[in-house]
């Protein structure tokens, strides 16, 4: 039986002679040595950065679905006891906005308070965003003496600046850990091993620093999952992202879902040596859409993000961090999730209710700018749009510098706290090219080696930014070398 969001991964293998259940994929691989790669899962991972449904990289090993009771007998039977789509697609509340704010505050306070262990040293991962700020503000009401905050990033990034401002306002100690690419590189294989290769190495940059804090912290609390339940990803985050709500046909919807939620779009299918990869990927997305039992494009996109992308990220992050600390994620609280998903779309758009709730509860902290917008919560919409334009201009200038210098130099805007694209062309370049252009990699018959060579060449020269797919390819290939090559 999994929890409602599948935060703690459960893998299983079941056939007529074996039933194996384990919290890690590699544990099953050590026992079962007759396996085949699941090409659908590999294609999904290289396109989205995660696998869909219950798939893993191995055909006959599955990940238990969230909100399900899975029975392994003569056959596998699954019974769903909680479903995201029941709330995403439900009739929305008509309660007054001011009353919803109070209920939201009560639910948040409860979700956080019941995750505070007695007599434990608590650390909060504090970024420059709203979610982690919300967590530390509520925690500070209950256990101000036992809380420390920590922030990861490159020096002088906005996360460092705003997290320290929040900590100072609350009179809490804040420790800044500067990301060291050399230290991160040394941890690549360990990270891939701990997460079974099912999440890109670029998303776990803080792991190399966490074991050092084992003797200082008991419980690690994070604001992860706050953005999606409050509606941050409902509408396009940038001008290049498709507006799924405006799609008219099934084909438009499927392609929009791929473009919105993938790392490389349908082009990711070109990384595999197959002619019908794009058609197969769209069919797999269609299966997800049909299982959602939803009809409105916006609700389907919301479901896809929560049930597929966020669930996989949560499970893998918990699988990693949970080995070191008592790891808590208050925004996954069942009552809070249900409340947020039942809000009208207008209240979740741009996190309207979440922002109003925070401003009402913590007006002083609301005056400290957010990392994403460089503006505080009380800023006018016109001023927000102005800073948003500056954000896109900085990114465009960054790409111009990279192209003009053939990837040798880059411009780093202050909002970037983890410059993995820069590191991929500098500190990580020998390692990445050594694996992705290696003869062993290119000897695998399922890779399209010509396409891999092309994206590596264009990325390293600064002509294109293929950062996301470069790290996904590296993660998957290293997983193959660490755990699979000896059994296939």
Image: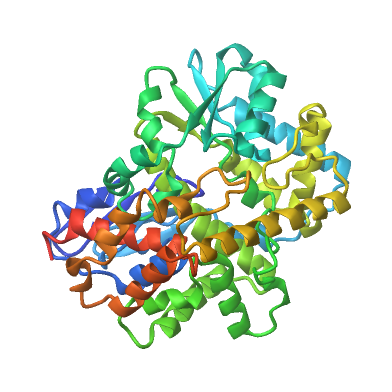
Q: 434 or 91, which is in the foreground?
A: 434
- Where does the image place residue 351, in percent across and percent down from the top left? 74, 49
Q: Is 151 situated above or below 116?
A: below
Q: Is 47 situated above or below 415?
A: below
In which image quadrant can residue 55 be found? bottom left
Q: Residue at x 57, y 60 (%)?
A: 401
Q: 428 or 363, which is in the foreground?
A: 428
Q: Which residue lies furthest to the bottom in this view?
A: 275
Q: Residue at x 80, y 40 (%)?
A: 377
- Where does the image place residue 220, in percent across and percent down from the top left? 48, 28
Q: Is 85 situated above or below 414?
A: below
Q: Is residue 110 visible?
A: yes
Q: Residue furthest front?
A: 405
- Residue 189 horizontal side relative to residue 171, left or right: left
Q: Which image quadrant: the C terminus?
A: bottom left
- Where does the image place residue 439, in percent across and percent down from the top left? 18, 69
Q: Which residue is drawn at 28% across and 76% down?
A: 449
Q: Which residue is drawn at 73% across and 32% down?
A: 106
The image's colour scheme reads: rainbow
Give the total of numbered labels: 0
In which image quadrant can residue 83 be found? bottom right
- Residue 405 horizontal side relative to residue 316, left or right: right
- Residue 70 horizontal side relative to residue 30, left or right: right
- Where does the image place residue 269, in percent across and percent down from the top left? 40, 77
Q: 294 or 360, which is in the foreground?
A: 360
Q: Is residue 61 visible?
A: no
Q: Is 38 situated above or below 228?
A: below
- Residue 303 horizontal side relative to residue 263, left or right: right
């Amino acid at each position: 039986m999994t929890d409602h969001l599948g935060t703690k991964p459960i893998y299983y293998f079941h056939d007529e002679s074996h039933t194996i259940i384990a919290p890690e994929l590699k544990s099953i691989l050590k026992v079962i040595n007759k396996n085949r790669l699941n090409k659908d899962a590999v294609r999904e991972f290289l396109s989205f950065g995660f696998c869909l449904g219950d798939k893993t990289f191995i055909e006959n090993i599955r990940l238990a679905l969230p909100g399900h009771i899975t029975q392994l007998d003569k056959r596998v039977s699954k019974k769903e006891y909680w479903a995201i789509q029941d709330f995403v697609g439900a009739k929305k509340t008509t309660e007054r906005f001011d009353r919803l704010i109070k209920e939201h505050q009560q639910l948040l306070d409860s979700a956080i308070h019941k995750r505070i262990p007695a007599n434990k040293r608590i650390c909060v991962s504090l970024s420059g965003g709203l979610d982690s700020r919300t967590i530390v503000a509520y925690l500070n009401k209950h256990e101000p003496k036992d809380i420390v905050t920590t922030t990861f990033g490159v020096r002088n990034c906005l996360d460092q600046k705003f997290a320290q401002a929040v900590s100072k306002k609350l009179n809490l100690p804040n420790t800044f850990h500067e990301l060291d690419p050399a230290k991160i590189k040394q941890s690549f294989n360990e990270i891939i091993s701990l997460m079974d290769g099912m999440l890109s190495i670029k998303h776990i940059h803080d792991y190399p620093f966490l074991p050092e804090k084992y003797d200082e912290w008991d419980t690690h609390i994070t604001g992860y999952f706050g953005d999606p339940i409050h509606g941050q990803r409902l509408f396009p985050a940038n001008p290049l992202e498709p507006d799924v709500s405006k799609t008219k046909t099934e084909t438009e919807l499927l392609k929009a879902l791929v473009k919105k939620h993938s790392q490389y779009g349908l082009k990711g299918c070109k990384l595999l040596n197959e002619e019908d990869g794009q058609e197969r990927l769209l069919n797999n997305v269609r299966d997800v859409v049909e299982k959602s039992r939803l009809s409105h494009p916006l609700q389907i996109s919301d479901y896809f993000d929560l049930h597929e992308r966020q669930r996989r990220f949560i499970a893998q992050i918990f699988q990693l961090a949970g080995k070191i600390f008592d790891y808590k994620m208050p925004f996954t609280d069942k009552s809070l999730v249900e409340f947020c998903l039942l809000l009208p779309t207008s209240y979740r758009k741009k996190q309207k209710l979440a922002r109003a709730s925070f401003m009402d509860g913590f007006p002083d902290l609301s005056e400290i700018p957010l990392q994403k917008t460089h503006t505080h919560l009380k800023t006018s919409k016109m001023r927000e749009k102005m800073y948003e334009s500056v954000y896109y201009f900085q990114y465009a200038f960054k790409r111009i510098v990279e192209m003009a210098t053939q990837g040798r130099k880059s411009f780093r805007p202050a909002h970037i706290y983890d410059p993995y694209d820069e590191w991929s062309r500098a500190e990580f370049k020998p390692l990445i090219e050594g694996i992705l252009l290696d003869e062993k990699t290119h000897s695998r018959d399922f890779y399209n080696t010509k396409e891999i060579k092309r994206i590596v060449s264009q990325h390293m020269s600064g002509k294109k930014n293929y950062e996301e797919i470069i790290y996904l390819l590296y993660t998957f290939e290293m997983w193959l070398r660490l755990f699979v090559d000896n059994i296939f």
